[in-house]
Structures are given as structure tokens and as C-alpha cells.
Amino acid sequence: MNGTATLLSLVNDAAVSVFGGLLSAAFCGALDTRRNRCIFWLGMALMLVPQGAVYLLWSAEFRLQVYPLIVHLPLLILLYALTKKWLWPAVSILSAYLFCQMRRWLALLAAAVLPGEEMTQKLAELIFTLPLLLIFLRFAAPAVRQLMEHPPKTQCQFGLVPALYYAFDYLTRIYTDLLSSGSPVVVEFMPTVCCGAYLVFLLYNFQEERQRQQMQQIQSNLDLQLSQAVREIRDLRESQSQAACYRHDLRHHLQYLLSCIENDQTERAKDYISGISSEIETQQVQRYCENEVVNLILSAFVKRAEETGIRMEIQGAVPGFLAVPDNDLCVILSNALENAIHACLPFALEEGPCVIRVEFRFQEKTGRLFLQISNPCGEEIRFEKGLPVSDRPGHGIGVQSIRAVVERHGGDCTFLAENGRFVLRLFL
């Protein structure tokens, strides 16, 4: 019977080593290639040799005490050789050790229900090994493995609870007898850790959800701004086409006017001239540079500014072709000019000097575009992380969209307030 118990214990120790090693390798993605799988199983076979020697030469108590040195440390070195990483393989080993608790607890439950005590427990651990391993590999491993692509900070946060459990288990059960002594402080430690981890999870999830909702709101506003800007460009292009038609039909207009004059219908001719002039004027797109999109956007906002008593001064040149897509250029200019006009409204209502200055410069050697837009600003502007912020709802999204587009194209932008004016400078 003693020989059977010894053999069962030896097989069980080998099974738990394979259980933890295979889970650790699956957690850190070390088994993705055939070469890695061959190296892993060869390493696992070699690791069983010192374990068997310790099992035969020393006591079970000593074997448990040196287990991290003869199993976990070699496993960490093996996983590093396969993944060329230290942090995530260490977290994977700690996580796999935590998952082994399920196997041990189910065996303890079986031993408490069925007769046989230690023999029943060892046999139950063997029976539960394969089903639990398959379940964890199928459902837990993909979820854990995807965390390896996260930043080291997130990986450490994920490994905190397994690390605390690992230290708690060895300090209170293997190296000391604090857990079996029944001390309330020790017994209640892991439940407290679980409570704290759950609280951290709730707070972290709440923060992530709030940021996700804010990003969705910002994205919705950006989509709305972009669709509005694209619609304005389309309307301006249609207006420009209509004006071109008027110019093309000039011969017919002149013939009609000549007919009116020949028939002494001077007033009708005047009214016709006035009507045509008004229609052409309303459809006119000013030419500020060679770029059609820039001309369309500037024409729309110049007209909007003039309607509120704001003057825009535009200098510089933009080539007909830019590496920046039209929709991104539209987002930048529309948001910047919209914010400038909005900031100038209080000055325009007070009939004070209100001028928006727009300056373009294009560097042909580098192919980069410089843009500066400045407008009066009365109140002190508060900045956070380089961006102007406002407590008014709906404000601040435009500058975020400008920075996002500029950074996406490898450019740089700055917002500042100097000499009573708010200034936006950007390179694209």
C-alpha cells in the first residue's frame, strides 16, 4: 500500500508540474510554433529529472520548500528562451499557480466527502487534472494571452493578485504554519485581497467606461462637424459651378440687354442687370490661393464673419495639391475658424476692433504647410496639457479634433494666448 501511495504521489507531482507548465506556456503564447512546442516539451522532460531526484532523496516538506527553485525558476528560464520576455512569463507562471488552486480544492472536497483521506485526495487531483487543463486552455488561455500586448503597467496590475496569492500560500502554508494555526488575521487575508481587487476592478472599469463614453461623444461631434464641413464644401462647389454657368451665358444676357435698350426698356434692363449681379455676387468664391478646398472654406467663413461684423485678414499661399486629405484639411480649418469667430462675437457686439488673422506658409523643400490663426481673447484662458479648456458644455472638442488630425499626419500644433490674442500654430 505504501508503494502504491508513493507511486501515486510521484505521478501526481509530475501531473501538477505539467499542468502548471502547460498553462504558463499557453498564457504567454510560447506554443505558437512547432519549434517552440518541441523545445517546451523537451524542457519539461528535463525539469522532471531534478524533481524526481528531490522526491526520492529528500522529504516531502523539503520538496515543497524548494519547489520554486526546481520548478518555477527553470520554467521561467524556459519561457524566456521561447518568448524573449521576462515580465509576462513571470505573470503567466503566477497565474497558472493560482489556477492550480482549483484543482487542489476540488480534490480536498472529494477527500472530505469520500473515505480514504490522503489517497483519495491524490487520486482526485489526478482525475481533475486533464478536465480542468482542457477547460482553462479553451477558455482562460486566450483571455489571458491577449493581455500580453498591453503595456507593462497593465501586466503588473493583472499579476498583482496571483503574486499576492503565491506569496501568501508559501509564507503561511509551506514555510510556516500560520494558516493552519487559525489566526484570524491570516485566514482573512486572502478574502480581503479579493475584496480589494474587486474594488480596484470596479473603479478601473468605471473609469474606462467613462472615458469610452467621452470618446464616443467626441467622435460623434467630430463626425457631425466633418459632415457639416463636407456639406458646406459641396454647396460652395455647386455655387461656383452655377456662377461659371452665369459667366458662360454672358452672351445671352448681353443679347437680352441689347434688346431691352433697342426697345427703350431701360428700367427692365437695369432690373435685369441688378438681379444678375446679385446672383453672381452671392455665388462668388474668393480666390486666396491655388488650393480649391482652402478657397471654398475661407470664402464660407469670411462671409459668415462679415455677417457678424468680424473682419478676416488672410495672407500666404497654399499649393493646389497637399499630402493632407481634403476632409482632414476641412476639419482643421473649419474648427479653427469656427472657434475664432465664436471668440470674436463678444467684441463684435461691443463694436470694438475685431480682426481674425490667417497666415499660410508652404515649405516646398519639406512639403510642409504652416498655418497660424489668431483672434482677440478677452478673458484669461485656462490650459490643460497644452489645450485650452472651458467649463461650458460642448466646448473644447474642436481643439481636440485639430490636434488629433495634426498628430495623425506627423505634424505639430500649439495653442497659446499672448498680447490679448489667442493663437493657433500648426505644421502639417
Image (tube, rainbow, N blue to C red):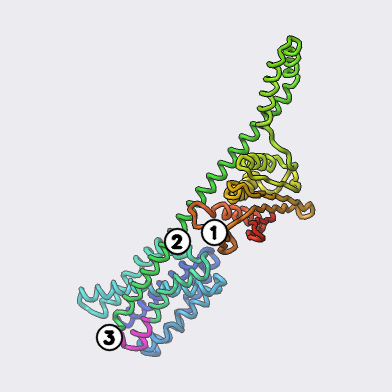
Residue depth check, mark 2 versus mark 3: number of the one nearer the observer: 2
Q: Using the image, tell me which numbered label, if any, was put on residue 247.
A: none
Q: Which residues are magenta?
A: 168-182
Residue in view at x 25 percent, y 73 percent: 109
Asked if residue 156 is positioned above or below residue 414 in the image, the reply reads below
Residue in view at x 73 percent, y 17 percent: 252
Identify the amino acid type marked 2. Answer: Glu
Query: In which quadrant is the N terminus drawn?
Result: bottom left
Residue in view at x 34 percent, y 65 percent: 131
Q: Are marks 1 and 3 in contact (CB under 8 Å)?
A: no
- Circle 1 sits in a helix, a strand or a loop, which is it? strand
Residue depth check, mark 1 versus mark 3: number of the one nearer the observer: 1
Q: Which residue has dot 2 on it? A: 208
First of labels 1, 2 by sequence position: 2
Please tell me whether residue 371 belongs to the stretch shown in magenta: no
**Image coordinates for residue 341, horizontal then vertical, percent:** 60, 47
- Circle 2 sits in a helix, a strand or a loop, which is it? helix
First of labels 2, 3 by sequence position: 3
Label 2 – label 3 distance at C-alpha: 38 Å
Q: Residue furthest right?
A: 365
Query: In which quadrant is the C terminus drawn?
Result: bottom right
Q: Which residue has dot 1 on it? A: 389
